[in-house]
Image (cartoon, rainbow, N blue to C red):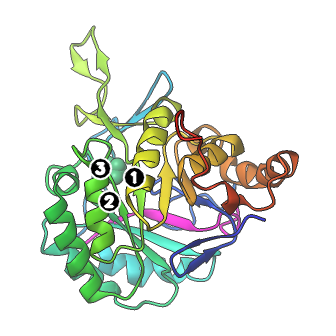
Amino acid sequence: MLDVRIGPIELKNPVISASGCYGQALESEAFVDAHVPGALLLKTITLHPRAGNPPPRIVEVAGGILNSIGLPNKGIERWLTETFPKVRGHASKLFLNIAGERTDEWPKIAARIGATPGIDALELNISCPNVEQGGLPFARDPETVARLVRVVKNETPIPLIVKLAPESPDIGGIALAAQENGATAVSLINTIRAMAVDWRSRKPKLGYGFGGLSGPAVKPVALRLVHEVARRVKIPVIGIGGIATADDVLEFLVAGATAVQVGTAAFRDPRALATIVDDLPKLLRDAEVAHVRDLTGTLRMPGAR
Ligand code: SIN
């Protein structure tokens, strides 16, 4: 009833933890068993260690949060040797989000990962709004995306998911560039560049000044973009953006997604992933939908009856 396919990867349900919202290992295991989501997607790892951005790194705003975490991590070498052995085999499927600061770093990360058994997919984070090098500029140019996907693919047989930015001038064109160069899927949206201001101190509330907005406030934007992208590409689309309930999941599927990622909701309720997975079968049964995949792309737009 719940299983879906992302290219060659079979997920037992369409719910994936969003990068940064479960951990870089099993940090959230006390709340949600890592086998519960269809896949556990771990937070971004880069080639070299990164300290991340100055605090405060997260502020709450109406309808969500702003983050400017800045991709702190200990680098791919230490992640593979120190962290990965503790995570390997502990999730139904394990996806890893990776990012390069410069174009030449991506194939180096991919080469180090190679064909590592136990990593089922790599999500290419071309869309982080919180870093000075890399991040958003990658996501704006189809040629750059095409080249990145090609060079990463040359170094690893692991399926690639390209994480898209809501700010791309032509997000469908970017998704097509990913598809045509061998990406297995695209995921969207990453956070929307935003800021929060403390008028008394005349300072931004985030240590980095800007951040990325996520949570319920971005859901309508994400639904529109998922719908737009799903009509342009044949590869699976993974929806992200303010998903907090099983109803939200099914909305994204109807809009065109094959699977979804749950992020900010886990900060409000650390058990959100599990609750959402538990609630899906009843919603499907009540609506007499035999299988979750029967919903993908079934949105009836006005004039398209
Ligand atoms: C961050 O670490 O700054 C967030 C990651 C992202 O938005 O891609």
Q: Earlier in the sequence, mark 1 or mark 3?
A: 3
User: In the picture shown, does residue 260 fall above or below 129?
Assistant: below
Magenta residue check for 263: no
Reading the image, the residue beneath label 1 is 229
Give residue 171's mark.
3
Where residue 2 sits, quadrant-wise, is bottom right
Q: Amino acid at mark 2?
A: Ala
Q: Position of residue 228 (x, y in %)?
A: 40, 46
Question: What's the distance in space between the residues labelled 1 and 3, CA to CA?
Answer: 7 Å
Q: Which quarter shows the N terminus?
A: bottom right
Residue 270 seen in the current view:
no
**Disc 3 residue type (three-letter):** Ile
- Magenta residues, start to end: 33-47
Reply above or below: 151 against 49.
Answer: below
From this view, report whether residue 165 is shown above or below residue 238.
above
Q: Residue at x 33, y 87 (%)?
A: 156
Q: Is residue 128 left or right of residue 7?
A: left
Q: Secondary structure at mark 2?
A: helix
Provide the secondary structure element on which disc 3 rests. helix
Name the residue located 32 percent from the left edge and 77 percent from the top edge.
182
Label ID, residue 175: 2
Using the image as rendered, state which of residue 176 and residue 103 is in the foreground.
176
Q: Residue furthest top?
A: 200
Tell whether label 2 touches label 1 (CB within 8 Å).
yes
Left/right of residue 6 with respect to residue 106 in the rendered view: right
Q: Quick one: SS at disc 1?
A: helix
Query: What's the residue type where badge 1 is placed?
Result: Val
